[in-house]
Structure formats: structure tokens, C-alpha cells
Image (spheres, coloured by chain):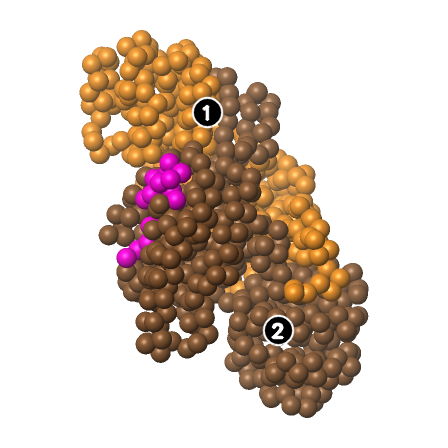
Chain colours: A orange, B brown
Amino acid sequence: MIRELAEKAKACLPALAQGDRDQALLRMARLLEERWEEVKEANEKDLEAAQEAGLPKPKRDRLRLDEKARRDLVEGLRQIALLPDPLFRIEGLVKRPNGLKVGRMRVPLGLIGFVYESRPGATVEAVSVALKAGNAMLLRGGKEAFLSNQALVGLWKRALKEAGLPKEAVSLVPTTDREAVLEMCRLELLDLLIPRGGEELIRLVQKEARVPVLAHAKGVNHLYVDERADLGMALELALNGKTQRPAVCNALEAVLVHEKVAPAFLPRLEEVMRKQGVELRACPRALALLEEAVPASEEEWDREYLDLILRVKVVKGLEEALDHIARFGSRHTEAICTQDPQTAWRFLEGVDASLVLWNASTRFNDGFQLGLGAEIGISTTKLHAYGPMGVLELTTLKWVALGEGQVRT
Amino acid sequence: MIRELAEKAKACLPALAQGDRDQALLRMARLLEERWEEVKEANEKDLEAAQEAGLPKPKRDRLRLDEKARRDLVEGLRQIALLPDPLFRIEGLVKRPNGLKVGRMRVPLGLIGFVYESRPGATVEAVSVALKAGNAMLLRGGKEAFLSNQALVGLWKRALKEAGLPKEAVSLVPTTDREAVLEMCRLELLDLLIPRGGEELIRLVQKEARVPVLAHAKGVNHLYVDERADLGMALELALNGKTQRPAVCNALEAVLVHEKVAPAFLPRLEEVMRKQGVELRACPRALALLEEAVPASEEEWDREYLDLILRVKVVKGLEEALDHIARFGSRHTEAICTQDPQTAWRFLEGVDASLVLWNASTRFNDGFQLGLGAEIGISTTKLHAYGPMGVLELTTLKWVALGEGQVRT
């Protein structure tokens, strides 16, 4: 069944690439306005079932499609439709000594599998980015959002049809069990598989996949406060990173402080964090400088709390900070606070992460914040796309050569 | 043992990225001149063993490192050393509305595993491309070339040391059995695994790998001769594609001919191919126009002969050619011969292959021919690198952000 959906989607690729995909996005925006009742009804059934099943309130909130969610989705679709069409432009066409003109043409990746949990808004956002780039999409959403996802995919099929495109280009897998995930992992028809959700789901897909996967499992993100940091700025960065939205992947999980500034910095950090209800877990040296912190256990230095908990560690300097990040970081987002450009550049060059920041909050690791205009997820895989994946990251470059009969001699 | 080598190589990455890698390449070139006797001696032992083991002559020829091979390797090293250093340049640094400057910095992929068969020259060429891009290399060469590879890796370690770089950055796995390949497939320390060799090896690695793989399994490459082709040119392209070097991956394996020109073209094709000793295997319609061709069986339309055999098929036109290529091609190299630009562009856009050519020989799918300056292999994986992989294809782009205390609001 999944294979059949995939084969049909794959057969749409030539028509998608040559068709008016922006028109499909604009039609979808219009349908979300005109036929919202259908989506709302399905979403309410999902919410009722979630309540009966005892799903905790934060998860139910993520499931809800309210008026604001609708406005954001519609606005997002119209913005993506306005982005330039990435397909079939040729980059770097050069003339070789034999007269052959060679360059690289941007084309869709092909058929993308998308495995995701709860939030049904992703059914609109992810598909819009993939379609913009000319890809077909096979979706496997979470159990809790099944009816909402089904309603939204129904609108996608209608939007595609209204734009003169094959409706099989976007499909929802009709089952939400673990077997469906495993089947997608082994579906060699997929050119790319993007899992989005909890660490457990991502690890499962990364382990089982026989097709290329782009994803991040977690964001264990550090802020290194250098001896030459502006401590007021460092406090703001720590506070923003930890508390502005603690449950997201680019939130801050640990602060590393240079030993020379630790006595001045840590009490101030404790004060602002206490006001926000943040619990500090500290290394022995930091503990001595803090009043209410608890010891951090050896096992938790690579943990992603996604909560109001912050680790604190005193380090001897840049080298120890780099070593710590290399050992415990997750290649997601790493930041330094310093007024010393030399130290900053050593950090920027030396840290292996999808975004490395100097004097800015880790919260900027996001496709919109970095100017991509849209995002389907963040990758910590180093191949193809390292960081937020937007429209261009869902395309590839094939070589083209324009000749007049050239042969090799 | 393999894991230990990988851990040591991985630890070299910061020193490699910041060190004088060009110096290591130049030292290697010098060592190949000064200490060639060591390599030659090892190579002769490999050749003796190969003869005793009854290895066929073409395979023994590939194993041999003669004077010409040495000159080519030395020349290649010096050319790669002259290429610009790709690392730490920042692409597209833009200022966001909040003043944050964001861009993408080119950095090494990390630790690359390279699994290859017979030809020992690859031990120099592949390592030089990887090192240029700041990567460490873990090599698993073929049994037949083991002593040659060991001698060459010995020189690499010496070259690295003379350039002030850690010699653990390049290592040869001391076993050449299948188990070593499987162990590398599961070695999550590898940022990339590149297999190069026969179809069986590639399929094994693609099936077993738990790490990102870039490779091509085979090159089932077509030339479509359109109704508006210059038939003289088409003959030259077919001849060059099939006979200039039949045993390589970018050689031509099949010709698709438009039915309107088949009666004029096929007898001429048969004549030139006969002179080169090429056997033609044909579809029923083509058979009727050829004198000595044999029928092509249904099972062989996706076969890579790597030999003086050419398939011939008559098609109704462009659409049938596109369908045939989509079904039987291997996404490696596909060419059209036509004087009609509209048909040519439909082919260039519509064919999914790492190189699509218009009026040029398939033999141009090669890093040197396309202007990369070097090549470690050709990828038909669409992610990250589609086509020849040179120095840039062995790097990645991470995001960097330069701020003055920016936080998200």
C-alpha cells in the first residue's frame, strides 16, 4: 500500500517539475480560508480523542489548529509562493578548452518521505517547501493528528488538481503504527527521508533507514562565556537561549564559563535564572560559586532537557570549552560570548555544529531567522544540508554539458 | 583495531584543518620521486602473487605501478596543491534586519572511509583530494594491492610528518577481508563512506552502511539519436562513447534511435562498430535494419557490459526515449544528439542523471573533464554530490552568525 502510493507519487515528478507549483500553493492558501470548517471539524475530533486518551495538555495544545494557526499557515503559503522558482537554473556554466559548455542545473530531489509527530501544521508547512522545490511527498503523521492530517492532505490534493497538477504528488500513509515508519525506512523509492519528532523516533529512523536521511536527533547547545565577554551581554544570551522557548531544539542547555570570570558571572546568572524559575545543575567548581544549584551528574552532560534546567561548568579557557563541546555537543547550535575577535574566530572555525554564533542567542538556528524564507527541519547530518533545510536544500544540482559534437581523445 | 585507527584519525581533524595540507601534498610528490624503489618493490611482490594466484592479465595491468603511473601521480599531487584552499571561506554573508550577519563557512566533512579494489594509484589520488579539503582518511584497499597500498600509505605518513601534520590522519586498514568492509559500514565515526569498485562491492556497502555513502553502482549510459540529429556526429559520439575506453563507468552501453532516422543510421552504425569489433544487440525493429546483430534479451536492458558490446533500440521519439532511460538508466550519464534546441532542452531538463549531455560524448563524465581539477569518484546519489566528486564535494557548509548581543524576541 505504501509502495503503491510511492510509485504513484514518483510518476508525478516530471509533471510537477514542469507545472505551476506556485499556483498550487496559492490555491492551498485559498482553500484553507474557504474550507477551514472541514479541517476544524477533523481537528476537534482529534482533540476529543486525545483528551479521552489522557494526552497531557502541552501535547494537546500542539495538536490544536486555531484561527492564529490558520492565519500563519495561509501567510506562510503565500510567502513561499513568492520566493523565486529554484528549478532549471544553471549555475556556473563555463566553457572548457574543447568548447564544451558545462554547468550545474538545479533539479528536484524527487520523492521525499516525511515522518512526523503530533503538530498537524507541519502537514501544510513541510509540503509547501517540498512542492516549491518540485518534489513529491509521502507523509506519515502521528496517530493523534491523523484526522487533521487527512483533512489537510485532502485540501492539498484539491489544490494540486485546481493548479493542473497530479493529485498523487502528495499522499498520507493511511496507517500510523511503527510498522509504517519501518516500511518507509526501507522504501528505496524515496530519494530522501526526513523524520521530525522526538529523539526516539529520529534514532529509530537513523538506525533502520536504507535511504538517505536528513534530521537532527537533539540540540545539546552550549554558550561559552569567555574571559573577555561582556558579562551583561552574556547574561542576556543565556537568558534568551534558555527561557524564551525552552522546549525547542535551538534552546540553550549548558553554559561554559571561563574560570577568570566565573566568580563575577555565576552569582548574577543564578539571580536572573532564579527569577525565571530555572534550575541550575553545576560542576563542582561552579557549585562553590552558586547558592542553590545542584550537582550535575556525569551522565547528564549530553542531555537535552527541553525544560527550565541549565547546566553550568567552569572551564580553564577556550581549549577546554572546545573539547567539551566536541565531546558532549550534538552538532546543532553552539555560541561564544567574547569581545576578543581572535578567540571568536578560533571558536567559529573550530566548532563542528550546524550553526556557530558569536555574541548572539542560540535561538537563531531557524530557517526564517537565517533568511531561508521557509524551513522543513534542521539537519545535523553534515552531508547535503547542515542546518536549517529550506527550498534550495530540497533540490540537487546535476551536471549538464552543451556541445557541438565533442568527443574525448 | 579499525575503530582505534578511526578514533586516532578523527582526533587529527582540528590540526589538519589549520595545518599546511598543500605542503603535505608537495612532500608526497617529492617522496614518490625519491623513494619510488620502496613502492616498486612492494608492487612487484603484489604482481608476483597475482600471477601465482592466476589473476587475468587485464587485472594485473591495473595493478601495475610503472614509470608513467608515477609521473601521473606526481603531476596530479602538484596540480591539487596549486588549487585554492577551500576551507574557512564564508559564502553569502548577509546582514539580517536585526543586524546579525549570517553566512555559511566551508569546512571539512571530517573522517572519510574509502573502500576500493585493485588499482593502487587510488591510494595517492583519493587521499590527495580528501586531504586538500581537510579530511582524514581511513583506507581499505583490495587484497591484490595490499603491499603496494601499504608502501604508499607509509609515504603519506612520512609526508604528513614532514609537513608538521599528524601522521594518523591517513591509515590503511590492515585486513582486506569482507569483514573489514562490513565493520567500516557500521563505523559511526565515519562522516562519509566512499566505495569504489565493482557493482557487487558497491551494492554490499549501500545495503549494509549505517553511515552516509556516496557512490555509483554502475553506468548504464544511453545516447538518444533524435530525428533531427546530425547523423555523422551521432556516429562519432556512439563510437567514442563505446570504444574509446569500453571498461569505464562513463562508456556508452546503449543507443536509442528515432524511428524516422533508424533506416539511414543503423547500417552506418553497424559498419563503424564492426570495424572496431563491437557486437550489436538489438530490439526487434532494429534487428530488421542490421545484418549481424543478435537479439537483445529482455533482461539485459539495464546491463553494464564494460566491453565491446552495444545495445540498439528503435524508439518512436523523445517520450519513449525518456521513458526508457527513466526505467533502465542508472542515473550516471545520458546524452542526446539533435540539432533541435527545443528537443535538446526537454532532454536536458527531463533526464535524471548526474550528467546530461547535448551533442557530446558520455566519456566527459569525469572530474578533470568537467573542470574540478581532481576526482575521488562519481556519485549517483542525489544528495550532496551528484556526479564527479572533487575537493569541494568533500567539504560541507556550516552556518556562522556574527552578532553584537542579538536575542530573539
- A319 relative to B251, above or below: above
Q: Which mark is residue B34?
A: none
Residue B300 shown in magenta: no
Amino acid type at image mark 1: Trp
Residue drawn at x 57%, y 66% is: B250
Give the structural element (helix, strand or loop) at label 1: helix
**Subunit under mark 1:** A
**Residue where numbered disc 2 is placed:** B242
Q: Are marks 1 and 2 on the same chain?
A: no
Between residue B127 and residue A315, name the one nearer to us: B127
- Disc 1: which residue: A345
Q: Which residues are magenta?
A: B159-174
Quarter occupied by the C terminus of chain A: bottom right
- Residue B343 visible? The answer is yes
Establish if B350 lies above or below A380: below
Q: CA distance from mark 1 to mark 2?
A: 52 Å
Would you say A76 lies left or right of B196 here?
right
Q: Chain of mark 2?
A: B
Question: What residue is drawn where x is 66% and y is 56%?
Answer: A400
At x 55%, y 32%, the residue is B90
